Amino acid sequence: MILGAVQGITEFFPISSSGHLVVLQSLLGLKEEFAFDVFLHLGTTAAILIYFRKEVTSLLTDIRSIALIVAASVPTFIIGLSFKDAVEKFFGMPNVVGYMLVLTGILLLAASFYERFMLPRRGLGFINSVIIGIAQGIAVMPGISRSGTTIGTGMLCGIDKEKAFRFSFLLAIPAVLGASVLKLHKIGQGIAGKDAGIFIAGGLVAMAVGLAAIRILFNALIRNKLYIFGIYCVLAGALIIIFI
């Protein structure tokens, strides 16, 4: 339940859920369980579906939006499949998380600074969608925030922050579901076995906390407070590098 709460907060706050789970598991002396981490992501995906239910429903009749999500998802899946085995090794290395958090923080600070002077703003478009999709693929590394990277990249591409926010979370749905399919057999073993209660409890907490976190992030973004998360990532990453 603790890991589920951390997942719910950090998945939507642009501070890397996977990175925080790696560090927390290390501090608590827990063995890293990739299938459990993926199941927690399913919990936060459910939160996205609930929060953005109107947008998800409208996608069924919006061919252009579907095309943009597909265009962004292709590079994500290519990167994810190509580096899946290599990346999993980093889920037991907190020091790597520290460096990746610093990179995430720098990106958020740059996006926050750039957005204040960006005029005029551009539409999403296919090229920007692909760029955001590449950024999401890179965020498979623990410590690189998926939401922070996609929102920040969108803002640096000149996209309105609200559009970048919504596209980022809609884009998370196929990405997380795709990763879950790859680990479906391990998730199934966990649910069917003695860990069923652990998996379900973690997923439900992640979903509930995630719903609140999405709302908080949206309000922070509208009030131009994204830089706060950037500062946090830089400081947290530095502390991890030094002490863990």
Image (cartoon, helix red, strand yellow):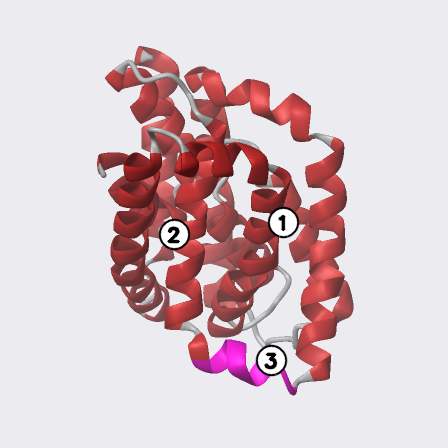
Cα distance between the residues tagged 2 and 3: 21 Å
Q: Residues within 10 Å of mark 3 (few under 14, many from 20)?
A: some
Quarter where residue 238 is shown: top left
Is residue 66 in view? yes
Q: Which residue is mark 1?
A: 178
Amino acid residing under circle 1: Gly
The image position of residue 91, as x and y in percent, is: 49, 23
- Mark 3 / mark 1, whichever is N-terminal: 3
Decide: is 121 above or below 232: below
Judge by depth and name the residue closer to the eye, 49 or 231: 49
Amino acid residing under circle 2: Gly
Judge by depth and name the residue closer to the eye, 179 or 128: 179
Q: Which residue is mark 3?
A: 59
Is residue 128 in view? no
Asked whether the beta carbons under mark 2 and mark 3 sit within 8 Å of each other, the answer is: no
Kindly identify which numbered label has been placed on residue 43.
Answer: 2
Cα distance between the residues tagged 3 and 1: 18 Å
Relative placement, left or right, of 200 versus 185 is left
- At 36% from the left edge and 31% from the top edge, which residue is drawn? 21
The image position of residue 114, as x and y in percent, is: 52, 59
Cα distance between the residues tagged 2 and 1: 14 Å
Q: Which residues are magenta?
A: 54-61
